[in-house]
Image: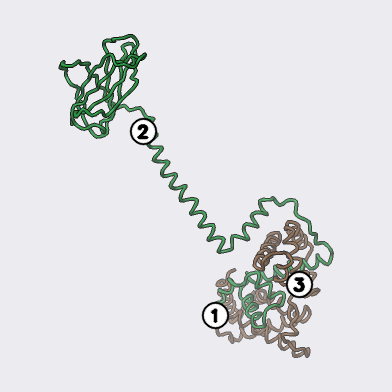
Amino acid sequence: MENFVDYCKIMEDDLIEKYLLGELSPDEEEIIEKHCFGCNQCFQRLREIEAIILALKEEAKRGKLTFEEPLTLNPPFHLLERVRSYITSPVFAAAMAILVIVLIYPAWRGMVSMSKLETTLKELRQPQVNVQSYSLQQTRAGEKVQIVQIPVMGRQPFLLHFNILEETIPNPRYAGEILNQQGKVIWRGENLKGLGEYEIFTISGNTQFFEEGVYTLRVYEINPEDNNVVDEFEFFFKMAK
Amino acid sequence: MDWQESIEEDIRLADEIRKGSSEAEACLCEKYRPKIFYFARTKAGYTAAEDICQDTITALLGAVRNGRIRNPEKLFSYVYQIYRNKLADYWRRTGKEMSLECVEKKIPSQAHQEEVDMEFRQALMEGWRELRLPDKRLLYLKYVKGMRYEEIAGILNMTVEVARKRAQRAKERIRSKLK
């Protein structure tokens, strides 16, 4: 059996119009007519389009066809119509697809990066509830004190507190440095400030930056007028696993 | 009714007509008469279409009653063939030859003006008023002036493809008002 159903796909208005205006060959007309005998939908569409064309001609004869721009159509509709006429172009569709990919990929990367940044910011904003505090005892040369042991467990923040018991001069400035067991300075602070009634100094650190061993915190009492060191104090702590 | 349903209906009606059902005959006539009349009118005019339609229906019913329709699923094709034969008979009777040069435009200018009633015209003009100016010009040049799309595209400064699609959309917009 001939597959006339396929003809429904080609019975577009363009073909129907050509039939109505006599622009098809007799063989082509026969195909259209035979299809319409079997397909009610296509026959109905043929009649509708014919009626439209007829009515347009009649109204034109009567002088009823006006050529004014409609007042009710919204500008976006015009734009949509214009855009729609371009969208059917395969080249335009391909260009739009490429543009979307080019725009979306960096944005997607940005969103991924942003999520990492947000995670980092969140970690920084959140208070560290698991920070260990250690009080260092002041020593002078030759004195032996119990050395505070700080466990090295990967990346673990800690606080070192110390207190300067004596001041050689009034209102000194304090500077400090931390030395490793080889005597190498691994940290330096130029202006240490004590807080609170007892002028407790606090230095924060992270165990990931320390190897096992004994470290020395050396604090210098400095005359702010001439920047000369008037005294120095040592505090010891040990990083141990 | 879609294609498959139409074929099934033809098979059922043919079977019932063979059994003597006058109701089935009326249904078959009602189904194909408008189509026969429509195409006959475009080829031979309004008056001749009545005769051609009647002759076709008569021949069709006779063939179905006598079981001469071997493949009822191709009934539509058989009806069309009968119609074509009756149309050729008409041309022979009237002494006119149906050639490519003599084929008239399918849309008669006066044959069925009365069929385009007032309500239809009002709905159509409502759709027309909502069209944009380029679309109005396009339809006017195409259907009133009878220009080809290639000519229209040059006048309205658009491609032929755009002209076709805009005309199609404009007609769809008008058709939406007709429903």
Query: In the image, residue B160 lies at what x, y percent?
Result: 67, 68
Q: CA distance from mark 2 to mark 3?
A: 76 Å
* Disc 1 from disc 3: Cα separation: 35 Å
How far across and down, in percent of the image, does residue A158 sit?
A: 27, 26
Q: Is residue A239 visible?
A: no
Q: Specify the chain shown as brown.
A: B
* A127 in relation to A67, above or below: above
Q: Which mark is residue B146?
A: 3
Residue at 50%, 51% (x, y): give it.
A103
Instruction: Name above or below for residue B69 compared with residue A125.
Output: below
Q: Amino acid at mark 2?
A: Glu
Q: Quadrant of the C terminus of chain A?
A: top left
Which residue carries the number 2 mark? A123
Few, some or many C-alpha atoms within 10 Å of disc 2 (few <14, some 14-19, many ≥20)?
Answer: few
Q: Chain of mark 3?
A: B
User: Residue beneath label 1, please?
Assistant: A2
- For the image, the number of numbered tags is 3
| Residue type highlighted by circle 1 | Glu
With respect to residue A138, does B158 lie above or below? below
Q: Nearer the viewer, residue B44 or A75?
A: A75
Can you tell which of label 2 and label 1 is closer to the viewer? 2
Residue situated in front as seen by the camera: A23 or A153: A153
The green one among the chains is A
Question: Which secondary structure, mark 3?
Answer: loop
Question: Would you identify the image quadrant in which residue B153 lies?
Answer: bottom right
Gap between marks 2 and 1, in whole Å? 73 Å
Instruction: State if disc 1 and disc 2 touch (CB < 8 Å).
Output: no
Q: Earlier in the sequence, mark 2 or mark 1?
A: 1
Q: Secondary structure at mark 1?
A: loop
Residue B144 picture location, percent across and down = 78, 69
Q: Are marks 2 and 3 on the same chain?
A: no
Q: In this rendering, would A137 be left or right of A66?
A: left
